[in-house]
Amino acid sequence: MKLSVESPPYHLLLVDALNLIRRIYAIAERPFQPIRGELSDQTRHQLIHNTATSTASAIKKLLQQFSPSHALMVFDASNTSWRKTLFPEYKEGRSPMPEALAYGMGQIQDHLLDVGIDSLLPEEDEADDVIATLALKTAAKQIPVTIISTDKGFNQLLHHEHIHVYDYFHRKFIQNEDVIEKFGIHSHQFSDFLSLAGDATNNIPGVSGIGPKSALEILSICPKLDHLDLHRLPPKYKCKMEEEWDSWQVFRQISQLKTDIELGINLKQLRLQRD
């Protein structure tokens, strides 16, 4: 997919900040991985400097590539997310942010300010929910939105005409056809698919005994699970869903992007200053 060469009057670029920064840091860290023990202060400073400059360079390339009229880097809140409140095991087992990266995050954010793009650090919301809210509100005005992220959770937005998701590291747009090819479902079914089959990345177990193939069969019978009629399902699935109905409702909720966050910002505040 390619956007028109002639940019529309407005175009919002939303960057999943930690998704981008952590991957750039991982690339910068590779030459030092054989080192055992704690990093020296000199190495730590060099890693942060390399990550900061590489991230700023990536943003400059994205601004040049897409020529957006508005842009924002969105970070995750430092507080516990509402998903973890509903399901304490959410994201359990994930590797924490490397200590050196956490220590140098302020320096990286300063570099991004020098590029001319603002950052949003929500008090209690995850970046994907903030991005989804901004994307949908903007797209509702028929303004194109490009989300920069490799987070598969954004797959559920791909059926919106004005929302695009771009993988910076593979230099490609993620499309509804990619979701169909990889998972066998349409993008608007993605969160329901995860709630049934589970999502190892976020430690969402799904319904016991229902894997990807079973989830596909259920979604072929009931394409939308908003008002799931268990009597339409084969007995083997009906029984499993009845047994874990309450858990599944939680998994379904935390698999969905939240799109109604009160952010207190408007598009005018995100306008890029051109030289």
Image: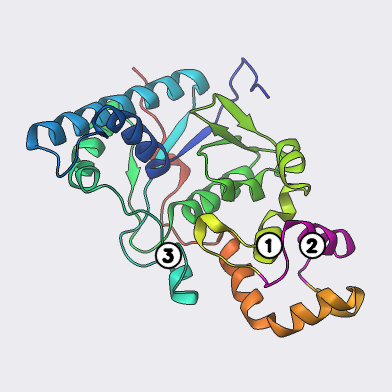
Mark positioned earlier in the residue sequence (1 or 3): 3
Q: Nearer the viewer, residue 132 or 222?
A: 222
Mark 3, residue position: 92
Cα gap from disc 2 to disc 3, whole angstroms? 25 Å
Instruction: Give SS at disc 3.
Output: loop
In the image, what residue type sits under mark 1?
Answer: Ala
Q: Give the crowd class for mark 3: few <14, some 14-19, many >=20 residues within 10 Å.
A: some
**Residue type beneath disc 2:** Ser
For marks 1 and 2, the one nearer the N-term is 1
Q: In terms of depth relative to the viewer, which is nearer, 63 or 223?
A: 223
Label 2 with label 3: CB-CB less than 8 Å: no
Sequence-wise, which precedes: disc 2 or disc 3? 3
The residue drawn where x is 78% and y is 57% is: 213
**Residue 156, percent across and down?**
66, 50
Q: Which residue is mark 1?
A: 197
Say above or below: 52 vs 246. Answer: above
Residue 186 higher or lower than 10, as above or below: below
Q: Is residue 67 above or below residue 251?
A: above
Q: Nearer the viewer, residue 108 or 50?
A: 50
Q: Which residues fall within the magenta stretch?
A: 207-226
Determine whether the residue tagged by mark 2 lies in a helix, strand or loop. helix
